């Protein structure tokens, strides 16, 4: 009876000892799969960016960007700058509180301390 119990205990211990590393192996494999997927996505993005760099390295594209981004003009051309008109809507200060929302005791304190005249 004792030998059977001892054998069963050894079998359970050996199973548990092998199960713990097995879980770590499975976890590491899933992390490896995630890292491979991330690497594939980064390689695709790098390929797209490399194609964009090649497209930007043409004389026509350089001229277009110089005109759009920097406002350059070719010799003999006249450059114009168009300024946007002032917005007609009044932008309210989000920090300023209208007088109606200020409590009465605060208005009295501001009057006595001079905070209402400081603007």
Image: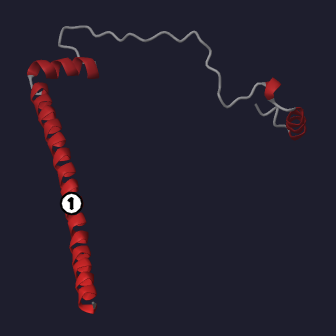
- Residue name at image x 26 percent, y 18 percent: 68
Q: How many marks?
A: 1
Image coordinates of residue 76 in percent, x first then y, are 18, 8
Q: Is residue 1 left or right of residue 59?
A: right
Callout 1: SS: helix
Query: Which of these two is toward me, 52 or 57?
Result: 52
Identity of the residue furthest to the front in this view: 1
**Image quadrant containing the N terminus:** bottom left
Q: Write down the quadrant of residue 105 in the picture.
A: top right
The percent coordinates of residue 117 (x first, y second) are 82, 31
Residue occupying the point 16% across, 34% down: 49
Q: Position of residue 66 (x, y in %)?
A: 21, 21
Reply above or below: 39 against 25.
above
Decide if residue 82 is on the left or right side of residue 55: right
Q: Residue at x 14, y 42 (%)?
A: 40
118 relative to 40, above or below: above
Name the residue carrying label 1: 26
**Residue at image coords 42%, 12%:** 83
Colour theme: secondary structure
Q: Quadrant of the C terminus?
A: top right
Left or right: 98 in relation to 112: left
Location of residue 1 with respect to 50 vertically, above or below? below
Q: Nearer the viewer, residue 65 or 99?
A: 99
- Residue 18 location, x and y as percent? 20, 73
Considering every residue shown, the one lying at the far bottom of the view is 2
Q: Quadrant of residue 43?
A: top left
Q: Residues within 10 Å of mark 1 (few under 14, many from 20)?
A: few
């Amino acid at each position: 009876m004792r030998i059977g119990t001892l054998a069963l205990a050894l079998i359970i211990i050996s199973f548990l000892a092998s199960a713990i590393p097995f879980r770590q192996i499975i976890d590491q494999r899933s992390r490896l799969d995630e890292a491979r997927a991330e690497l594939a996505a980064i390689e695709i993005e790098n390929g797209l960016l490399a194609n964009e760099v090649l497209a930007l390295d043409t004389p026509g594209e350089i001229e277009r960007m110089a005109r759009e981004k920097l406002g350059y003009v070719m010799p003999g051309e006249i450059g114009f700058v168009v300024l946007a008109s002032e917005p007609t809507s009044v932008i309210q200060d989000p920090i300023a509180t209208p007088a109606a929302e200020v409590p009465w005791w605060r208005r009295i304190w501001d009057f006595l301390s001079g905070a209402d005249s400081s603007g």
